[in-house]
Structure formats: C-alpha cells, structure tokens
Image (cartoon, rainbow, N blue to C red):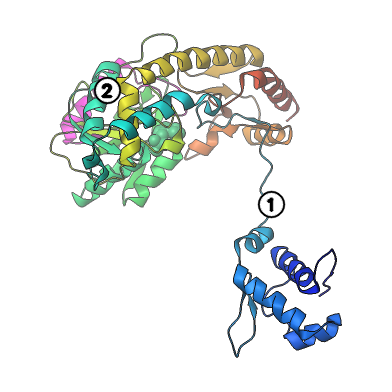
Amino acid sequence: MLLELSGRGPKHEQLASALRKAIRDGVLAGTVPPSRRLAADLGCSRWVVTQAYAQLVAEGYLAGRTGSATRVRPVGDAVAAKEPPRAAAPRYDLAPGLPDLRNFPRRPWAEAVREVLANTPHTDFGLPEPGGHPRLRQVLGEYLRRVRGAAPGTVLVCGGVTDGVTGVCRALVERGSTGLAVEDPGWTRLRRAAEDAGMTVHPVPVDDEGLDVGRIPAGVRAVLVTPAHQFPTGSVLSPRRRAELLAWARDVDGLILEDDYDAEFRYDRRPVGTVQGTDPGRVALFGSVSKTLSPALGLGWAVLPPQWTVRAHPPPVLDQLALAGFITGGGYDRYLRAARLRYRARRDKLVEALGPVRLSGVAAGLHLVLHLDRDAAAVVRKARAAGVKVADLDGYRTTPGEPALVLGYGNLADTGVEAAAGLLRQAMTTA
Ligand SMILES: Cc1ncc(COP(=O)(O)O)c(C=O)c1O
C-alpha cells in the first residue's frame, strides 16, 4: 500500500490524514502494519506512527487493544464507499405513487405542530394509547362522515393503509379466515402485506365496472377492493357491482376491506361515497395522508366494524395531534381544494400533451392508464433511457395482459409535463 504523506503540519498528522483517507476509500482494511515496520517503510520514527494510530483509534477508525494487532473498524464512510452506485434518478418520474411533494403545506403544517407544542396538556406526553389519540380518532370520524359519507365505527389511528390492512389480515388469520380476494390488477404492496400477515390471496379480475364480484372464489370470506378509484385501472366500482359486493358479504358472512387511498381527488364530479357508509358492519375502511399530503408522515386510519379490535402502529402522538388540529382548523380542506385544482390542471395538460393516444381511468386520483399497440416493457425501457420513468401495467397483474402503462402525475413538476410527454411519445413510436 502506498501512503502519500503530504501537506503542512507535523509528520504524525500527515500520516493520520493519509491513513484516514485510505480507510474511507476502502483501500486499507483488516489489520494495519505493525508500527515498527511502517516506521521503517516510511523512514520516520516509530513515535510518529504510534501517534497517528492513537489519533485514529480515538476517532473510531481503528480499534487497538494492547497485546493484539490494530484493526480497521468498518466505519460508515468506508462501508458506503464500497456500496454500488445508485441508479441515476430519472429526470421525469411518472411512476405512480407520490403526491406533489414540492407543494407539501410546510407552513400550515409547521403552524399545526407549533400549536400542539404550545397548547397540548402535559398529560398527553405520557404513554400513547394503542388505538391512537382519542382527539384524532374523534376528528377523523367526523371528517370521514362529512367528506367520505362514512358511517360511525371504531376509528383506529395507524401508520397508513398498509399498516391497517396488515392488522386486519392478522386478526382474520387469528379467527381462522385465511383467504383474501384481491383485485387483479391491483396494488402489489398490499397483496404482499396480506401474504406476509398469513393470508392466501386469490386474484379476481377487474373490468371497467371494477371488481368482477361474481368471480370471487367460493370459500373466500374477505375481499380487498378500491371502490372509489380502482388501482391501477382507474375504474369506479359500478352501482350494480357495489350492490353485488354487499350482497356477497352478507351471504358468506364476510368482510370487505375498502382501500380509500385517493378518493379526495375526483375532478369531474363529487367522489362516490364509501361502501362502508352503506353497511358499516361488513366493511373495514382504510385511508391515509400518503396521497393527500405525504407518505413520509406515516399517518393513516381504519374504521372498523364494532366487534373488531386490531393491533396496528399508530404514529407519534404529536403528529397525530398536529393532523387533528390541521383538520379542525380548516387547513386540510383548504390544502385539498387547492391540490384538486392543481392536479386537475396537470392531468388536463398531460392528456393534451400526449396527443392522440388511448387513455383510460376516470378523471380522478393521481394516475391514468395509457394503452399501447406494442410491447410495454420495451416502451418502459426506451422511456427510461430518455430520462422518463413510467410503470408497466403488467407489473400490477398476475398474468400479462394488453400492453399499457400506468402514468402517475402526482409528483411531476408542472414545468416538466410537456417535455415528459414529448419524450414518452417518442419512446412509444421508436420502441
Ligand atoms: C392502491 C393504494 N392503496 C393505498 C396506498 C397508500 O398506502 P399507505 O397509506 O400504506 O402509504 C397507496 C399509495 O401509494 C396505493 O397506491
């Protein structure tokens, strides 16, 4: 190993600095040379080497014990230096999932947090209640009644839709009910969460009326659906299918898990009310702020039928109280009104910029489906090479189907819509 001693200052400091760099770069690992030998190699006194080693032991780069060899400690930087480089972030990210992160309501949220810190009684700084803070549970119950037509039930505060669904799946397994019908195509992460909780999932086809209820296999007594805005096809569960779904739940004495993930965003009319509002004894309703504010908050809820108790992971109490204050102070409604206008305008602009292509999905949420006349995987690759990230609809299906892309516009900068659409159109014609 070559150690370059350079720079100003005493020799032992120059040596410490060279060793530090060698460790960070991953060049020096394992045992370091004995001080006598290194001193001979460098043509310096042994004291210089022992001083440098002692400095690096104090800084945590080296571990030295009397009587044994001095070793390099695997410090964070050295480990990070060896990690493979991450793939470059796409210039335009149209993979579905994120809301408009640039427009997170920083100021109103900070104000809600400040209010909580200033006014929350000290008694709230004790151990958190497992089902969530009573204040937020009450506020969410009222909000969901007002905005989503939800019926009263047991409101549980949890870490998000995934956390709530996981909790209910675990409770189902404990009750001996292990079959879960899921939408095909559907959101892969929730399907996996259900499997991790011990359920066997049964994919059921989706068409432009939503889940094909008649095809739920016999013997299955729980179903996970996105009635207000199917993910990813963008269809809405038709009134006929809603009635069939509720009749099915009554017939099999089953449970409907209603994923209401982005229902706040409907642009052509008022969003359809929840299925839970029609039969709260048969439906568990799930929602979160992952699509309205940010998934980084990890704030979600479930409204459960009366006899259900579920273990979930409620977020920190101060965040729960901030959300309660944000809702009751009117900040959440104001933010959603502005976000709706922004998303609607962005969706219109994207549709226009894509030109004469076949799109599907109602005017809602943060994504739409673009149908292709050629291999979707090839278009995804071409687009990615041009700096545009899009998702292949097959990624959400259990078996490959008609080629299509899922385009998420939630976190696409308004200034990038036309350029992204142009690059995507080019990828579609050249793939
Ligand atoms: C279909 C669907 N359900 C639920 C969620 C939200 O999940 P969570 O609240 O666990 O972040 C998302 C977010 O991407 C989603 O796409």
Q: Is mark 1 within 8 Å of ligand 1?
A: no
Quick check: 282 left or right of 148? Answer: left
Residue at point 18%, 43% (across, down): 309
Asked if marks 2 and 1 touch (Cβ < 8 Å), the reply is no
Relative vertical location of residue 404 with respect to residue 40 in this rendering, above or below:
above
User: Residue 154's x, y, as percent?
Assistant: 18, 33
| Viewport quadrant of the N terminus | bottom right
User: Residue 134's x, y, as percent?
Assistant: 20, 34
Relative vertical location of residue 34 with respect to residue 182 in this rendering, above or below:
below
- Which quarter of the rendered image does ligand 1 occupy? top left
Secondary structure category for the residue under label 2: helix
Q: Nearer the viewer, residue 282 or 211?
A: 282
In this rendering, does residue 215 appear at all?
Answer: no
Residue found at the very far top of the displayed protein: 269
Query: Where is mark 2, residue-wise?
Result: 144
Count how many numbered circles sit on residues in the image. 2
Query: Where is mark 1, residue-wise?
Result: 85
* Magenta segment: 228-256
Report the amino acid beneath label 2.
Leu
**Label 2: few (<14), some (14–19) or many (≥20) C-alpha neighbours in 10 Å:** many
Report the amino acid beneath label 1.
Pro
Q: Nearer the viewer, residue 373 or 52?
A: 52
How far is the residue under mark 2 from the one under mark 1? 44 Å
Q: Disc 2 or 1, which lies upstream in sequence?
A: 1
Residue at point 80%, 71% (across, down): 10
| Viewport quadrant of the C terminus | top right
Secondary structure category for the residue under label 1: loop
In this rendering, does residue 83 appear at all?
Answer: yes
Q: Is residue 249 magenta?
A: yes
User: Residue 287's x, y, as percent?
Assistant: 34, 30
